[in-house]
Image (cartoon, rainbow, N blue to C red):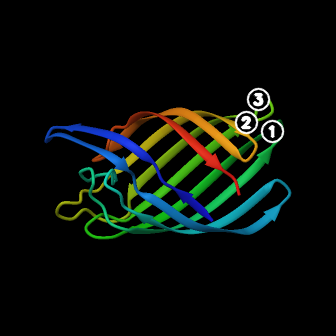
């Protein structure tokens, strides 16, 4: 089982003005199932649901807008020598309401320089999977994220930063973040 929620403070400045939101972002809940494992490779499939929150930021819509969404995701990871790995995730997200469906590609490279410490370099990309319609323009967005994660027993603390090097009809994001992970 996978779950994710976030408290966020978001400000959006555009030609149309200023928008801000503070509160829960969209929450995600999913079930992941191991599909195939061989040597250093592992493939999983995941089905999930996205529940909007008041701080939701749909890629190309005003803050606080967005409806439920459903997602099907394929994950492929490979362990490498020297306590490192890479991970590729490809997803299709079916959005409710007027929002355009999305195709997502997430890439991760991680390594452990010393025990209990991990460095992650990640890329998160999203494209509209449908043609634009009134109030919902086509979009694409690409984010890059760098972070460090420290393990303490069953809890991990992750700190990092991300930014958007390119996008079309999407948010230009820059943020610092702090995450707490719990393994069960």
Mark 3 touches mark 1? (CB < 8 Å)? no
Mark 1 to mark 2 CA distance (whole Å): 6 Å
Seen from the viewer's position, the closer of residues 132 and 44 is 44
Q: Which residue is mark 2?
A: 111
Tell me the number on the disc at residue 157: none
Secondary structure type for disc 3: loop
Please state the horizontal and vertical placement of residue 143, each as a whole percent of the image. Answer: 45, 41
Q: Left or right: where does residue 22 sit relative to residue 74?
A: left
Mark 1 touches mark 2? (CB < 8 Å)? yes
Residue 65: image quadrant is: bottom left
Circle 3 packing at 10 Å, graded few (<14), some (14-19), many (20+), is few
Q: Left or right: where does residue 117 sit relative to residue 99?
A: right
Q: Which residue is mark 3?
A: 113
In this view, 158 is above or below 102: above
Taking the spot 23% from the left edge, 51% from the top edge, the residue there is: 62
Please state the horizontal and vertical placement of residue 54, each as a whole percent of the image. Answer: 31, 54
Secondary structure type for disc 2: strand
In this view, 49 is above or below 65: below
Q: Left or right: where does residue 35 sit relative to residue 172?
A: right
Seen from the viewer's position, the closer of residues 29 and 15 is 29
Q: Which residue is mark 1?
A: 83
Seen from the viewer's position, the closer of residues 91 and 152 is 152
Q: Left or right: where does residue 133 sit relative to residue 81?
A: left
First along the sequence among labels 3 and 1: 1
Mark 2 touches mark 3? (CB < 8 Å)? yes
Taking the spot 27% from the left edge, 70% from the top edge, the residue there is: 97
Please state the horizontal and vertical placement of residue 100, each as a whole percent of the image. Answer: 32, 64
Secondary structure type for disc 1: loop
Taking the spot 35% from the left edge, 40% from the top edge, the residue there is: 9
Residue 147: image quadrant is: top right
């Amino acid at each position: 089982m996978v779950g994710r929620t976030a408290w966020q403070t978001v400000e959006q400045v555009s030609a149309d003005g200023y928008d801000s939101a503070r509160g829960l972002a969209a929450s995600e809940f999913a079930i992941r199932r191991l599909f195939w494992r061989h040597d250093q490779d592992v493939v999983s499939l995941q089905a999930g649901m996205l529940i909007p929150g008041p701080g939701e930021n749909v890629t190309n819509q005003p803050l606080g807008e967005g409806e439920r969404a459903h997602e099907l995701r394929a994950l492929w990871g490979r362990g490498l020598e020297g306590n490192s790995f890479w991970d590729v995730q490809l997803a299709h997200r079916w959005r409710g309401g007027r929002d355009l469906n999305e195709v997502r590609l997430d890439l991760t490279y991680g390594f452990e320089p010393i025990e209990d410490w991990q460095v992650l370099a990640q890329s998160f990309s999203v494209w509209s999977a449908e043609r634009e319609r009134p109030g919902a323009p086509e979009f694409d967005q690409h984010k890059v994220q760098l972070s460090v994660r420290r393990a303490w027993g069953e809890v991990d603390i992750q700190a990092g930063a991300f930014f958007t090097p390119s996008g079309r009809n999407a948010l230009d994001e820059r943020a610092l973040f702090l995450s707490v992970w719990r393994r069960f």
